[in-house]
Image (cartoon, rainbow, N blue to C red):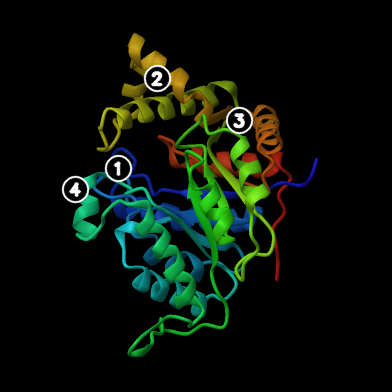
Amino acid sequence: MKDIKVGILDQSIVRHGATAREALLETIETVKLAEDLGYNRFWVSEHHNSPSIAGSAPEVLMVKLADETKHIKIGSGGIMLPNHSAFKMAENFRMLEALFPGRIEMGMGRAPGGDRISAMLLNPSNTFKEEDYLKQIDHLQHFFRDTAATESGRIYAIPQAESVPAQWILSSSGGSAKIAAEKGLGLAIAKFINGNVPPEIVKIYRDNFQPSESLQEPKVLLSSFVMCGETPQIAANMRKYMDYTLVQFEKGNFGKRPPFKEVEQYEFSAYEQQRLEANSNRIISGTQDQVKAELEELAETYDVDELVITTMSYDKQLRLKSFQLIAEAMSLQPQFA
């Protein structure tokens, strides 16, 4: 089996009794640990109108994360492009690329990252149409390569940079696989959002891939919720917290979670049990050997180049320990310049 690289997606979850600042400081602590452990990339997400998630502006947070590290790739997982002006996002990511050349990645998607109301407030001209999203992707390529122009002359996204950020198209249903292929961009599959996304979308992407200035060969990564505990009981506790959180999200409860003691005592209803089963393919959990086996099977089944893991936990130290255990299990090695 080929060596599988592993990355991290961090959503800056605001834990019970913590503040948004503490959640963001934990993200900074996590990226430093990730680099030390040998993780390949570290992405941060864009969420809105959700008090339990502090990550709303990945392009801002990325500046701090890149400045605190030396080698690990720093990216957005992702920028919800319809929420923004493509021109302004091009300038933001060109600024990042100019400051940290060769380390910046722009994962982008078309979901709102929240509800429709917050999406309209972010961009009142958002039509939610796929054709507009495709135009934004095309415009980005022109802005990144100084080929944008109007009848009045060239349009330059400032600052001009000698290199272009790596670009990935996010897909949770498979519908964006062809977009990524036709645009010649990387494909990032969000299995942590849709556990039933079929492996066939990778074949569709690879079969239809058209080389571009951005990418000569197809690249695929896949993300999943992953929790690893030193003991079966710790792993089970982390899994119950994750199950509870997803059930609450599905109910529209995006506020902060209660302390684990309450979650531990919580009994899922018959309907919620059905939802746990439906969500089971979004989550990998267990001890080191179990997690390693499932990650390797996942990578092989989907034929991906890299796995990206995202981990929620009621306890900071358990979460950081989980990343350490996974790094050991997957034989990750720190990369040095």
Q: How far apart are marks 2 and 3 (CA)?
A: 27 Å
Task: Tell which circle, 4 or 3, labels the residue nearer the N-terminal end.
Answer: 4
Q: Which mark is residue 52?
A: 1
Task: Tell which circle, 4 or 1, labels the residue nearer the N-terminal end.
Answer: 1
- Residue receiving disc 3: 230
- Residue receiving disc 2: 275
From the top left corner, tell me how far across and down residue 80 is, in percent. Answer: 37, 55
User: As displayed, is residue 69 above or below residue 299?
Assistant: below
Q: Which of marks 4 and 3 is in front?
A: 4
The answer to whether one can see residue 267 in this image is no
Task: Tell which circle, 3 or 1, labels the residue nearer the N-terminal end.
Answer: 1
Number of numbered discs present? Answer: 4
- Residue receiving disc 4: 117
* Category of crowding for the residue at label 3, using alpha-carbon neighbours closer than 10 angstroms: few (below 14), some (14–19), many (at least 20): some
Q: Distance between the residues labelled 3 and 1?
A: 26 Å
* Category of crowding for the residue at label 4, using alpha-carbon neighbours closer than 10 angstroms: few (below 14), some (14–19), many (at least 20): few
Q: Which residue is drawn at 70% across and 66% down?
A: 336
Q: Is mark 2 on a helix, strand or loop?
A: helix
Placement of the C terminus among the 4 image quadrants: bottom right
Q: Which residue is drawn at 60% across and 68% down?
A: 214
Q: What element carries label 3?
A: loop
Q: Nearer the viewer, mark 3 or mark 1?
A: 1
Q: Which residue is drawn at 68% across and 39% down?
A: 299
Q: Distance between the residues labelled 1 and 2?
A: 21 Å
Q: Which of 80 and 327 is in front in this view?
A: 80
Tags 4 and 1 in contact by the CB under 8 Å rule? no
Q: In the figure, is residue 57 to the left or right of 293?
A: left
Q: In which quarter of the image is residue 180?
A: bottom right
* Category of crowding for the residue at label 2, using alpha-carbon neighbours closer than 10 angstroms: few (below 14), some (14–19), many (at least 20): some
